[in-house]
Each structure stands twice: as C-alpha cells, then as structure tokens.
Amino acid sequence: MGSDCLFCRIVAGEIPATVVRETETTLAFRDIDPKAPVHVLVIPKEHYADIATLAQGDPALAADVLATSAAVAEDEGLLGDGFRLMFNTGAYGGQEVFHVHAHLLGGAPLGPMLARDLG
Ligand code: AMP
C-alpha cells in the first residue's frame, strides 16, 4: 500500500508514533486521540484494509495481532480489571483508517459497549 496509507507510513517510520511494542509482524502504538486512560492501536505491518480481509487472507497474521494485543494488555496492567479489544470495520463500524487496527482500551470502567440503544 505505502505512501497513501497513514499506518503504513507509521510502520515505515515516516510519521512518528509512540510505539509500545513491536514484533516481526506487528506494531502497537498509542492512539493520538485516546478515548480511555489506555488506548493502544495494534496493527499488522503488512497492509490489510480491515479485520475481515486480514482474517480471511492471513489467519496466522490475525493471530499475531491478537497475541500482541494480549502482550500489551499485560504490559499496561490491564489483565486484572479487564479491557476492551475492538475492530471498527467499514462504514457502519465507524472505521476511519483503512489499515486494520485493534483498539485496546482500558484503565477505567468503559461503560456499555455501544453509546446508544439501537432497540
Ligand atoms: P478507526 O475509527 O477505528 O479507523 O480508528 C482510527 C484511530 O486512529 C482513531 O482512534 C484515531 O485517533 C487514530 N489515529 C489517527 N491518526 C493517528 C496517528 N497519527 N497516530 C496514532 N493514532 C492515530
């Protein structure tokens, strides 16, 4: 993908980020506009647009993203009280950056999963 993709540019070191963990295949960095005391984004270094494309195209790499997310959760002290891991996907999911990323959120009670009741 490369120069058109914000997160590919972070992987390439062209845009700064506060990296908290890096593996051969994944990168974890702090969200620039945190929605919780801990808000880390976990991405595969290779470009996939969203979690569906990644999970279908390279399940092992999807597992790497989950493993890195769990390791960061442990590093950030979230395993005891819990955390939320979510993948916004597509228009209805509210995805804004089309390089798949897990949002790892924690450090305080996060409230209901959705802001409003759709029922
Ligand atoms: P989403 O709406 O799921 O696509 O989430 C995109 C996330 O990327 C948002 O939470 C943004 O705050 C975050 N974001 C955008 N630009 C940057 C950046 N340069 N560094 C870190 N996080 C970013």
Image (cartoon, helix red, strand yellow):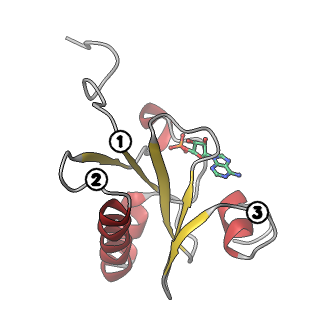
Spatial CA distance of label 1 from label 3 is 24 Å
Q: Name the N-terminal-most of marks 1 and 3.
A: 3
Q: Nearer the viewer, residue 87 or 106?
A: 106
Type of the residue with mark 2: Leu
Marks 1 and 2, how far apart at CA: 7 Å
If you read the primary sequence from the N terminus, does the residue marked by circle 1 or circle 2 appear first? 2
Q: Quadrant of the C terminus?
A: top left
**Residue at (29% x, 66% y) in the render:** 70
The secondary structure type at the circle numbered 1 is loop
Residue at numbered disc 3: 16
Q: Is residue 82 left or right of residue 20?
A: left
Mark 1 — residue?
107
Q: Amino acid at mark 3?
A: Pro
Q: Are marks 1 and 3 in contact (CB under 8 Å)?
A: no
Q: Distance from label 2 to label 3 (Cα)?
A: 25 Å
| Identity of the residue furthest to the bottom in this view | 24
Residue 60, image x, y percentages: 32, 82
Cβ atoms under marks 1 and 2 closer than 8 Å: yes
Pick the front one: 53 or 3: 3
Residue at image location 74% in from the left, 67% down from the top: 9
Question: Residue 111, image x and y in percent?
Answer: 27, 24
The mark found on residue 78 in the picture is 2
